[in-house]
Image (cartoon, rainbow, N blue to C red):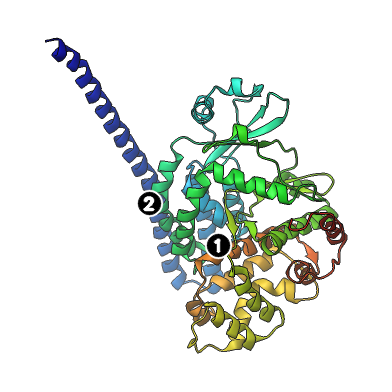
Amino acid sequence: MGRLSRGIPLAGAVAGLAAGAAALADEQRRERLRRSSRVWFLTARRTLHYGLVRLRGRRASEEERARLEAQFAIRTAEDVARELGNMKGAIMKAGQMVSFVAEGLPAEAQAALATLQADVPPMAPSLAEGVVRAELGDEPDRLFLDWSPEPVAAASIGQVHRAVLPDGRLVAVKVQYPGVDRAIRSDLDNAELLYGLFSSLALKNLDVQGIVDELRERMADELDYRIEARCQQEFADRYRGHPFIRIPDVVPERSARRVLTSEWVEGMSWAEFSETATWEARQKAAEVLFRFAQGSVHRHGVFNGDPHPGNYRFHPDGSITFLDFGLVKRWTPGELETLSPILDAILDRDPKRTVVALVDAGFLAPDHGLDPDLVWEYVSGPYVPYIETEFTFTREWVGETLGRTVNINGPYAEVIRALNLPASYVLLDRVVWGVSALLGRLEASGRWGDLLAEYRKGAPPTTELGRVEAAWRARQPAGV
C-alpha cells in the first residue's frame, strides 16, 4: 500500500508535466498560426489590390497608370509597416532588409517603410530580467551596480538596456526576446510570401528564394549572441585606436547565448545626424562609412553584412561607432580573388574581358550567347561611381539603378535570366547596395574610384582621411 500511495503523486506529477507540455505546444501552434495568418492576410490584401490596379490601369492613360501604381506602393508600404512593426523576429528582419534599399519607391512609401528601422514595442521588464537570470545565473541588480529596467532601444530579435558594471563602467546589455527562436522558425516559411509581396510592389525580379535561404542560414547565427560577441570583439581589436572608426569592446563575463554586454556608446543616431549635420559633416560621414566597408572587405577579409542606418552612432569629431555584428561574412580562401578580375574588367570599361571573367567565376555559362556590351552595361550599373572620375550619390540614382538591375521585363531581361549569383556573394551584393543607399541619402560627392583603389590596389591616399588612416596603419604591428 505504501508503494502504491507514493506512486500516486508521482503519476500525478508526470501527468501534470505532460499536460503542461501539451498546453505549451498548443500555445506555440496558436502563436505560429497567428503570425502566419497576419502575413497571409497582408499578402492577400495587397495582391487583391494589385490586381485591381492592373485592371484599372488597362483603360488608363500612362500618366494615370503611373499615379495608380504610386498610390498602390504607398498604401502597401503603410500596410506592411503597420503589420510588421509589432512582429519581432525574422519577419521584421525581412522587412528591414528590403526597406533601406527601397529607393525606387515614392517618398511616402519610403517614409512608411523607414519606420521598420525604428524601435519596436519592448518586452516587459520582468521578461528581460528573466532572460538575464537564466543566462547569467543571477538577478540583474546583483550582476550590475545599476540596471535600467526600461530598454533604451528595441529591435527585431532583442532589446538594449543601460547598466553599470561593479567596476563603474557604463555598458549596453542586449537581451534576446524569449521565444523569438520559435517565432523565427515559422517566420522563415512566411518570408517567401513577404518577399513575393515586395517583388510585386517595386522590386520586380527580387530573388525571393535566395534571400529567404540567406535569412534561414544567418538567423541561426544571429540568435546565438556568443557568435556575435566573438565577431564584435574581433572588429574591436582590428580597429582599436583607429582615427575615425570605433567598435565597442565586449564584456565577456556578462555575455552568454541570449545576452550580449558591451561598452556603452553615446552619439547621434542616423535620424539625429541627418537632421542636423552640415554638408561638410555629411561628406566626412559618407567617406567614413565607405572606408569601413571597403577596408573590412578588401583588407581584413571579414565584413559586416548589415549596413542599415540603425547600426551607427555619429560623434562630433566626425568619427562613427559601428554596432551590431550579428550578420558577418568571412571570406573563404579564393572567394575574393575570384571576384577581382571581374571588377578589374568592369572598371577598365572592357566588355569582352568582363564576360570572360564572369564565365571563369561561374556567374555565366560558357554558352551564354550574350552580347558583351549588353552584359557590361548591366553589371557595371552599381559601379558607375567608381568608373567616373567624380560622382555624387543621390537617392534618385540609387533608385533608378536598382530598378534597372531587378527589372526582369526591361532591356537587360536576357542578361538577368542568364546571370547566376553564387550564394557566397549574396551578402557582398547587399553591402554594395546598402552602402550606396546610405551615400545616396547623404548626397555624398567624391572621387570614389580613387578611394576604392586604396583598398583594392594599395594606391596612395587622395584625401585627408585616407592619409590619417594610412599613418595609423603604418603604426600597427604586422598582420593587423
Q: Is residue 189 left or right of residue 19?
A: right
Q: Is residue 333 above or below residue 365?
A: above
User: Which amino acid type is shown beneath numbered disc 1?
Assistant: Ala
SS of the residue at dot 2? helix
Q: Which quadrant of the figure contains the N terminus?
A: top left
Nearest to the observer: residue 374 or residue 68? 374
Residue 148 drawn above or below residue 201: above
Residue 27 image position (x, y, % from top left): 33, 35
Q: Position of residue 429 (x, y in %)?
A: 59, 65
The residue positioned 72% from the left and 38% from the top of the image is: 265
Residue 45 can be seen in this image: no
Quadrant in the picture for residue 28: top left
User: Which residue matches tag 2?
Assistant: 40
Q: Residues within 10 Å of mark 1 (few under 14, many from 20)?
A: some
User: Which of 293 and 285 lies nearest the eye of the viewer?
Assistant: 293
- Secondary element under disc 1, as helix, strand or loop, is helix
Whether 174 is drawn above or below 139: the answer is below
**Residue corresponding to mark 1:** 70
Q: Quadrant of the C terminus?
A: bottom right
